[in-house]
DNA sequence: CTGAAAGCGCTTACAG
DNA sequence: CTGAAAGCGCTTACAG
């Protein structure tokens, strides 16, 4: 294949220099006179020359590609992370291979091998939950960064949303609105996202000397669970004026049960949820206030880290990014 | 970079043959004795040799990569299409570069150039609506296939869901259930998806000698519009027992207004919608029956066509894929 | 500061 | 059937 376009020799010819010199000029090496450099650059521009990546790669150069191995089947996490990374790398510098391992370690390994054969300069792994992920199936000779799901390996580098902070922000927001009788409805308690968000809620409540008006109700990350949990909560006679839901799906279910019971949101009960999944949070009435996990930014940070590591730096640890509350009608009113 | 692994010369050495022979054996060329071929293959396996793609590419070989240029910011279309393509190509044969042009033709051009410099063997363009898309910004020397949004260029090849068929299937389903007083709530009438689905509905109704009980109400592709439209429809005193919604968002809005008015679904009114966006369609009560657009299959077809075109065949036209109705509680009951 | 030469890891005519 | 040689489009020591 190759791109059928002009080759370096054409540029060199047009500029009246050797390929070697043309190469150096184009790569900004010092040992070229300014005049020569200009001639070459101009010729290159004129012919709209694009160096053949495969040839560069063969010298031991970078391929200008990165592999993103996802495991969220719908792209809810991986697409914004990919976009953030794209912005961080720059379109012309790095292109990203996107694959989905579909939660299968064997498939992951196949993707890894295929992408390594294509000479990617690094990998971004995107998990589907914030729990630590098992080690990668094989030795990888290029830098690796994990996003969303941290790696359990000690000298790996991960970027994850700060779900404790998310819990704090949701809670603080309700307190700021003057709500004191708070309840918490959560998803599957096996998720670290649950534990973390729960911890953040607790921290802020403790600081304010406030207690939840009812034990945490945890179940699934679904609207059905949100509906049921709120129905039960109301049936139990609990009096609450603020509700924290651990996902937008739960939040939507909650809104539905509240509406059905004639409870006004946010007047009687202010509701804040997590994830800020727009198709869910912005389509209901009232629209849901929700804590955003900043996927785009996480992707951007991952790209920058990868760039540094490709430059030879060693980095490791779990980097945590604060979340960001998006306020909408369910706490603010219209 | 290159993969640090074994090179062809290592395999050749291990097998006791020349690199040339090893290459031929590995590539299944005829002029190698069976015994030699076996020796080479075994050595290759033993060393888990993976040919350096960059080197192969440099001979004029294929790069084993394809560019997918999307424009749906959330990956709702492009991720399943990518997965379908991945299955069609086979993980080891082709890796796909995923980029999002974000609806910007300039950005699209940049992505095109970057991917061509990387020697992709073909492109898949994924649009965000089924309306014809403007021509690609530049001449592309490799095969191109369009998915979802057909190209307006005469000798291009496109794969799109058959939305007329989708309208037909939704309507026929309601008729099969014995519903005769049907209403239709649609999204933005500027979309071809609107016109097509509408046409399919009309076709089946005409065939059955049935008419819609109210003029089509068209607005936006949102839950808010679904809520309002159904509210208005009921307020107008229209008596209906079947409702077709042109998207799941509209469908969810409709369900909400029906519930609020105490109308039972599907007993009083059966509801069927379009898109089968699972996070919306399966999380409500009752769950929505919905027509699936078969993105995965579209992606698979696109990959097969691309493979054929890379093999030298010329293909063009707009290929239409029948949709598939997924029946759930909103028409079937529990 | 410039260019001829070697080489990255493969494949492909071409001899033998 | 097998292998030596040339070459894909670049980059990088090395001379000059």
Image (cartoon, coloured by chain):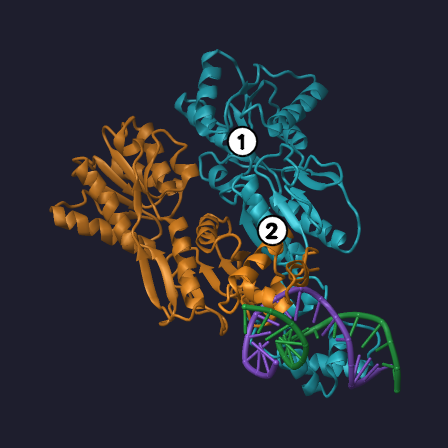
Chain colours: A orange, B cyan, C green, D purple
Between discs 2 and 1, the one toward the N terminus? 2
Lateral position of residue B113 relative to residue A292, left or right: right
Q: Residue at x 55, y 31 (%)?
A: B273
Residue that mark 2 sits on: B113
Q: In which quarter of the image is residue A98?
A: bottom right
The chain letter under disc 2 is: B
Q: Residue at x 19, y 35 (%)?
A: A177
| Quarter of the figure that contains the N terminus of chain A | bottom right
Lateral position of residue B51 relative to residue A188, left or right: right
Q: In which quarter of the image is residue B105?
A: top right
Number of labels in the image equals 2
| Quarter of the figure that contains the C terminus of chain A | top left
How crowded pointer 2 is (Cα within 10 Å; few <14, some 14-19, many 20+) is rated as some
Q: In this view, does A128 lie above or below B129?
A: below
Instruction: Find residue B315 and name its label.
Output: none
Q: Which of B215 and A176 is in front in this view?
A: A176
Q: Nearer the viewer, residue A246 or B257?
A: A246
Q: Residue at x 54, y 49 (%)?
A: B99
How crowded pointer 1 is (Cα within 10 Å; few <14, some 14-19, many 20+) is rated as many
Q: Callout 2: helix, strand or loop?
A: helix
> CA–CA distance between discs 2 and 1?
36 Å
Q: Position of residue B283 (x, y in %)?
A: 45, 39
Residue that mark 1 sits on: B247
Q: Where is residue B327 in the image (x, y as percent from the top left)?
A: 57, 37
Q: In which quarter of the image is residue A3?
A: bottom right
Q: Is residue B103 above or below residue B95?
A: above
Q: Is residue A114 visible?
A: no
Q: Which residue is drawn at 22% across and 44% down?
A: A171
Lateral position of residue A193 relative to residue B119, left or right: left
C-beta proximity under 8 Å, tags 2 and 1? no
Q: In this view, does A157 lie above or below A164?
A: below
Pair 2/1: label in front? 2
């Amino acid at each position: 294949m190759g791109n059928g376009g002009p080759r370096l020799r054409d540029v060199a010819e047009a500029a009246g220099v050797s390929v070697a010199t043309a190469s150096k000029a184009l790569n900004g090496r010092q040992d070229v006179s300014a005049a020569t450099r200009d001639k070459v650059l101009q010729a290159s521009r004129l012919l709209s020359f694009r160096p053949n990546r495969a040839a560069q790669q063969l010298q031991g150069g970078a391929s200008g590609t990165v592999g993103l191995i996802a495991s969220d089947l719908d792209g809810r996490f991986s697409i914004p992370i990919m976009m953030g990374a794209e912005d961080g790398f720059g379109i012309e510098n790095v292109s990203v291979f996107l694959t989905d391992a579909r939660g299968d370690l064997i498939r992951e390994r196949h993707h890894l091998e295929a992408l390594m054969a294509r000479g990617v300069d690094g990998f971004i792994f995107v998990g589907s939950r914030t729990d630590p992920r098992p080690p990668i199936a094989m030795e990888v000779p290029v830098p690796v960064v994990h996003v969303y799901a941290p790696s359990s390996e000690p000298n790996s580098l991960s970027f994850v949303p700060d779900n404790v902070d998310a819990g704090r922000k949701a809670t603080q927001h309700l307190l700021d609105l003057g709500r004191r009788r708070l309840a918490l409805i959560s998803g599957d308690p096996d998720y670290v996202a649950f534990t973390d968000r729960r911890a953040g809620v607790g921290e802020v409540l403790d600081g304010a000397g406030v207690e939840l008006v009812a034990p945490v109700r945890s179940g699934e990350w679904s609207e059905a669970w949100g509906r049921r949990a709120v129905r039960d909560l109301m049936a139990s006679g609990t009096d609450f004026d603020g509700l924290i839901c651990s996902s937008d799906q739960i939040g939507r279910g909650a809104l539905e049960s509240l509406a059905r019971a004639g409870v006004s949101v946010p007047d009687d009960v202010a509701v804040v949820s997590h994830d800020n999944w727009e198709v869910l949070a912005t389509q209901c009435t009232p629209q849901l206030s929700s804590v955003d996990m900043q996927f785009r930014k996480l992707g951007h940070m991952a790209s920058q880290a990868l760039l540094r590591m490709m430059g030879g730096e060693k980095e490791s640890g779990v980097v945590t990014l604060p979340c960001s509350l998006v306020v909408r009608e369910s706490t603010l009113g219209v």
